[in-house]
Amino acid sequence: MKKIIVGLMIAFLFTACGSDDSEEKTVVPKLVVGKSLETLVLSDQFENSNTIDTDTKKVIFAFSKDVAHTCNDYFVTQKATYLSDNKTVFIADVSAAPSLIRSMFIMPGLKDFKHTVLILDDKKIAAPFRSGVDTQKIVIVYLDNKSITSIKTINSADELKSIIETN
């Protein structure tokens, strides 16, 4: 019986770690100038549903662990309303992390932040946002009435501060 359980666990592990690359090849990018983020609804670190407001001017995307750490390390040095005061939203993509790691470590860690972090936690939902952008950099999406007007990538917290605080 013990061997059967161990065998099932190993089979489940290999099944869960597999990916279907064919799905990613047919993804239509969502971060494209002219497209709208009007229908985007994401939960924050406290599981509250959020949408992009019409007065939001910038959306910061962090698609990798290092990029998210760079952003969060900067945001923790600011007041809790820093992002909203600057009409900015922060979105972290945690979809690549295994669900066990997300639920045991990432999500509880995000609850310690005073700033709002919107979460992309599903690979299928995150894929169109990741498509066509440099996921190893901070991605800044500029909006006008929820419509994307331009997209920029940056590397550092200094650049991030400059962009957030520039109208």
Image (cartoon, rainbow, N blue to C red):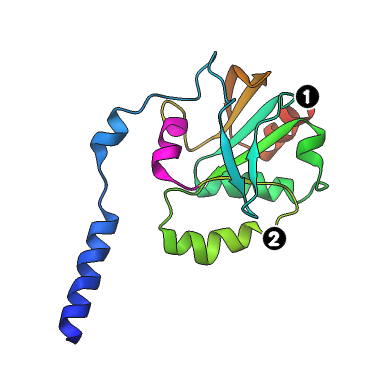
Residue in the image at 25% along x and 52% along y: 18
**Residue 126 occupies which quadrant of the picture?**
top left
Residue 6 percent location from the top left of the image: 21, 78
Residue in the image at 43% along x and 64% along y: 100
Q: Quadrant of the N terminus?
A: bottom left
Q: Main secondary structure of the magenta part?
A: helix
Q: CA distance from mark 2 to mark 1?
A: 27 Å
Please state which amino acid type lies under the numbered disc 2. Answer: Asp
Please state which amino acid type lies under the numbered disc 1. Answer: Thr
Q: Secondary structure at mark 2?
A: loop
Q: Residues within 10 Å of mark 2 (few under 14, many from 20)?
A: few
Mark carried by residue 108:
none
As rendered, which of 73 and 63 lies closer to the eye? 63
Which residue is tagged 1?
Answer: 166
Q: Which residues are magenta?
A: 121-130
Q: Quadrant of the C terminus?
A: top right
Which residue is tagged 2?
Answer: 112
Residue 44 percent location from the top left of the image: 63, 48
Q: Residue furthest bottom?
A: 1
**Residue 21 occupies which quadrant of the picture?**
top left
